[in-house]
Image (cartoon, rainbow, N blue to C red):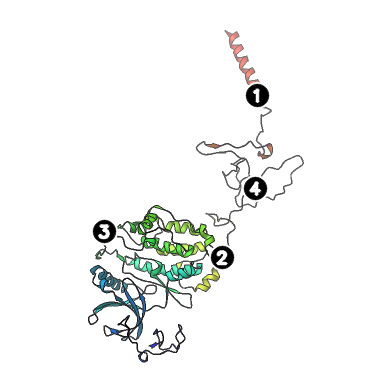
Amino acid sequence: MKSCPKCMRVFPDDAGFCPADGSALQHASMVPIANTKEDARLGTRLCDRYELRRVVADGGMGRVYEGIDKQTQTRVAVKVLHDDVAKDDVSLARFKREYAISSQLPHTYIVKVMDFQRDEVAGVWLLVMEFLDGEELRFTLKREKNLEPARLVRMLAQTAIGLDEAHGRQFVHRDLKPDNLFLCGTREGGDVKILDFGSVKDKNKDAKKLTVLGTTIGSPYYMAPEQAQGLDTLDARADVFALAAITYECITGTVPFTGNNGPSILLAILTKDPEPVSTRSAASKYPIPAALDDVLEEALAKNPNIRTKSVGDFATAIGRAYGFAGDHKTWACIPVAELARELATVPTPASEPNAVLGQPIPPFPAAVAADPFTVRDPFAAAPSKSVTAPMGVTPSAPPSPVLGLATQDSRVVGTRGASVAAPQSGPSDRPAGLPAGRAPWLLPVVAGVVALAVGIVAFLALAR
């Protein structure tokens, strides 16, 4: 392994220069690290195996170091738990479970956890993971506000593959948020690694429960309603809700549910519906298809029984709403640049598609027939604006292209007898064959019937 003499980053043997500061790399053994007053662990080797080279992050649960596994000569991330965390039995049990569960999962899109043990000499617990180059989605959103559609679709596709594998083994992540989606930089445009399975809910029958019934686990902004209520019925659909909330933020730049504190955020999740993303298009750097509204509405449904069934289905629905062909398993492997080119070729439909035939419905003519029962092929070509008719005959307006649909100039009688009144139409609006106004043959017929009735009465009177 090699190391940078300035920043102490670690690189494989075939690397030549540090991309962070341009320094020439040297073999790690030639770049010793002196510990400091701020951190006496730097330069030491824990469990006689893991050499700590530099501090990467410092969180509420522990401090993360970049280091070298001297047994395998690989780059690793070592999280050393804070003393107060290590003394808490439940917190310690969660880290042990994260290691145990991670060993059962494929690691294509999930961070690999390789070791969890205690260094008896230093008196600390450490969790060892693969080292990732890149940044958390939280930092990307803070810098860019919105995620471009191609990058979003690829990220969701990869996240869905990783989560579906976990869900298939009855593990619910339960703490999905931008902080736990790590974007690794690659030539293809970035690969996702899902972090932190320490809050996972194990739905297997013999699983040990670490959470007391009614306890709320997770981040408020992305928490499903059933999770906010601490219900034990929580399942994989809670992760669908969280991933949809993350997607909403990637598209609009804001979370779907807001509040001044945790309780007010949870109340909003339980009682309010987020604003449709299509209405936020002015605030986004990228076009927002109206089809996304329905996809997110279903995925953010408060009732899990009507929510999108899986994260895979959700990721596929998002991609298709943007106009991509295929499904999330295909998009996960396509470079972002190629997805962006495909998106650029997607035509914008001029009208809504027909639900049955999948073909565009021609626009309605400016005028429609007064008779709503006139049937016409809805896909026939619309008549031209100029219609030639015989002299003295006024051409009738074209009938409505949809059976039973009439404009404000018609009168429609429904199947239950309800009617909608409208102004009377003139003769030119009436189909041929129907009488207009008072029929000319009506009076003679009535007079004949009356005369016949009078004659019958007179005959009967004389017969008596």
User: Disc 4 residue type?
Assistant: Ala
User: Disc 3 residue type?
Assistant: Leu
Of residue 139 and residue 177, the one placed in the foreground of this image is 139
Residue picked out by circle 2: 346
| Quadrant in which the C terminus is drawn | top right
Q: Determine contact: label 4, label 2, CB under 8 Å.
A: no
Kindly identify which numbered label has been placed on residue 445: 1
Image position, residue 16 (x, y; %): 45, 89
User: Disc 2 residue type?
Assistant: Val
Main SS of the magenta part reads: loop
Residue picked out by circle 4: 366
464 left or right of 448 in image: left
Question: Of helix, strand and loop, which one carries label 1?
Answer: helix
Q: Residues within 10 Å of mark 3 (few under 14, many from 20)?
A: few
Residue picked out by circle 3: 213
Q: Residues within 10 Å of mark 2 (few under 14, many from 20)?
A: few
